Each structure stands twice: as C-alpha cells, then as structure tokens.
Image: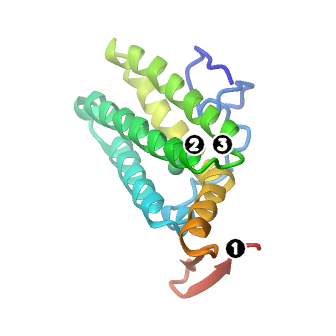
Amino acid sequence: MTSTTTPPHPPAKHKSSNPVLRNDAAPEGPPVSRHITALGYAPMDDIHDEFDEFLAQASACQDSDLVEMLRALQTHLQSHFSQENRWMTETAFPARECHIAEHDAVLASVTQVMVKVEDGNLDIGRSLVQALVYWFPPHAVHLDSALAQWMCKRRTGGIPIVLHPRRSGSVTSRTAPP
Ligand SMILES: [Fe+2]
Ligand SMILES: [Fe+2]
C-alpha cells in the first residue's frame, strides 16, 4: 500500500488509498465509542485503551500542547503497531500481510503529517487526529478483532466473548462467530 502526500481532511470525501486518509467508510455520526472496540484479548485491549486516551487528549488539547501530544501519539502508534506485528509474525497469523501493510501505511501518513506539524501547521495535525478517530473503529473491527480471536484461541483454545454495555447502561453479550 502506498502513502500519499495529500493532507487528511476527515469531513471531505476523497479517493486516497491510504487507510488514514481514506474516509469513504467513515460513519455519518460521531466515531464509535471505545467500549465497542474491546476485543477480548486483554493485552490488545489495554493498548487500544491507551490509544483512545491519546486520541481524546490530542482532540481536546490546546494549540500550545498539540505538537507534544502528536509526538506522543506517534510514539504510541509505533509501539502499538510493532506489538501487533510481532504477535502476527511470531504466531504465523494467516492474514498478517494486509494488516501489517495497513499499519505501515498509517505510520507513513503520520510521519508525513508530523513534518508539516513540526513546521507549524497545526491545522493538519488536528485533521490527522480526526482522521485517526474515524480510522480506528473499522480497523479494530475488521483486522484487530481477527488477531484478538487468534491470540485467544492459541492461549485458551476458545475465542473471546465480550460484554458490551448498551447505551441505556444495561449489559448484553455478544458471542463471536465460530
Ligand atoms: Fe490495534
Ligand atoms: Fe492493527
């Protein structure tokens, strides 16, 4: 997958092949909240909680803190993706190529944007944060979830069952497909 130099603009539709910049799958409403991305493999869920925190802080921070927040977010993503890539390669996860390629494309995009942010373009930094907010839920649902099931099955022989609170506050269960 190739990266692009086109800056991310989450509200506008465009045709980038970069998974961060490509927003044609972005939901109409606000991004999916964090509990939906709990996948049942605790080490991964912990990493995703940390990612959610970085995104929340980077979304809400003052301009004076934005560059530092984005540097921290970039460092997190490098560590986050390295860990998932390691799980995939060490266990010969069958679908690892496309997943690793998407991680690489996201990091390439973040690196490109950070060059502009370090030059003082804070708007593109804000756009990057929004793009990541929309990119993450479908990545978690479509790619990370398969890896989480794979890792759980290797450890326990079964796939995870994740309990998600309903919007009303009650609890329901979701059983992963066999
Ligand atoms: Fe992940
Ligand atoms: Fe991933």
- Where the C terminus falls, by quadrant? bottom right
Marks 2/1: CA–CA distance:
23 Å
Q: Classify 10 Å Cα crowding around label 3: few (below 14), some (14-19), many (20 and above).
A: some
Which kind of residue does numbered mark 1 sit on? Answer: Ala
Residue name at image x 76 percent, y 72 percent: 177
Ligand 1 within 8 Å, label 1 CB: no
x, y (%) of residue 93?
Answer: 65, 49
Q: Are marks 3 and 1 in contact (CB under 8 Å)?
A: no
The type of residue carrying mark 3 is Arg
User: Which residue is drawn at the image coordinates 41% and 58% (left, top)?
Assistant: 49
Q: Which residue is mark 1?
A: 176
Pointer 3 and pointer 2: residues touching (CB < 8 Å)? Answer: yes
Label 3 sits on residue: 96
Residue 76 lies in what quarter of the image? Answer: top left
Residue 111 in view (yes/no):
yes
Residue 108 in the figure: left or right of residue 173? left
Q: Position of residue 167 (x, y in %)?
A: 56, 77
**How far apart in space, not on screen, are marks 3 and 2 (Cα)?**
7 Å
